[in-house]
Amino acid sequence: MNRTAPRVALIIASTRTNRLADLVAPWVHAQLQARPDLEVDLIDIRETTALPFYDLPAAPAMARRHYTSAPERALGERLDAADGFVILTNEYNHGYSAGLKNVLDHYFAEFEHKPVAFIGYGNVGGSRAIEQLRQVVAELNMVSVRESVHILGIQFPAIREGGATAQAVFDTLHLRLTAMIDHLLWWARALAAARDDPANPVG
């Protein structure tokens, strides 16, 4: 793996048909692709519908990389190849999507000892969903980046309008997104080196 260019998986969490993520994700993806210091892989949870709801005989933390289906293996290998994650999450009913939770429940080693950052959208910028996710990723032995990006409900109409109106909203988020990614990459490099260290006692 090329450690000078960490691979970042951008995960779209919402599975709804008419979702704001379809308007936000292209902007985030473009910002990531424009950076020469990372590689990006776009993972859409809506496209993982072949992954059944979690019902495995052993917890993923115990049965590491034990895949029981081709879709589970395909997604697991993409997650495993990532050095860090950016999760673009909706907030519905003060929480995040069942599809995202199902993916997080299916894997462990693929996430462990890697950093994750969050972009949220909702009435209060997805902050409640993000706070819940910080607890979940801690149990996966991940590091959550302090900075996050929040898109408020009052900004939705401008984003849906598109064009210069949407770009004006994204421009206000650019500095925060840049700071978030900078810190994500710092952690990605540090943790990749630790994972590669043969003296690492926890593997």
Image (spheres, helix red, strand yellow):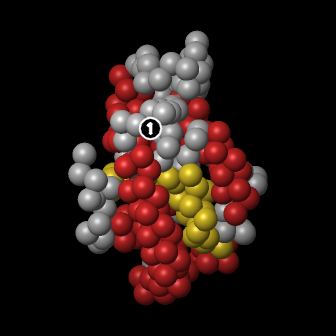
Estimate the x, y position of residue 170 in percent, counting from the top left.
48, 79
Nearer-the-camera pick, 35 or 192:
192
The reply, left or right, for residue 174 in relation to residue 59 is: left
Q: 7 left or right of 66?
A: left
Most distant residue in the front direction: 199
Q: Is residue 151 above or below residue 139?
A: below
Residue placed most toward the observer, 174 or 65: 65
Residue 8 picture quarter? bottom left
Above or below, 29 against 41 in this view is below
Residue under the point 48% across and 47% down: 114
The crowding category of the residue bearing disc 1, from other C-alpha atoms within 10 Å (few below 14, some 14 to 19, many at least 20), is: few
- At 67% across and 62% down in the image, what residue appears? 126
Q: Amino acid at mark 1?
A: Asn
Residue with the mark numbered 1: 200
Q: On the rendered image, what quadrant is the C terminus found in?
A: top left
Q: Visible in this render: residue 38?
A: yes
Q: Of all residues shown, which one is farthest toward the top? A: 57
Q: Secondary structure at mark 1?
A: loop
Count the labels in the image: 1
Q: Position of residue 86 (x, y in %)?
A: 48, 57
Foreground: 120 or 134? 134
Does the image show residue 44? no
How far across and how far down the image is residue 82, in percent?
A: 37, 46
The residue positioned 25% from the left and 46% from the top of the image is: 1
Residue that protrudes farthest toward the right in the picture: 94
Give the x, y percent position of residue 44.
43, 47
The image shows residue 12, relative to residue 22, as above or below, that is above
Picture quadrant where residue 137 is located: top right
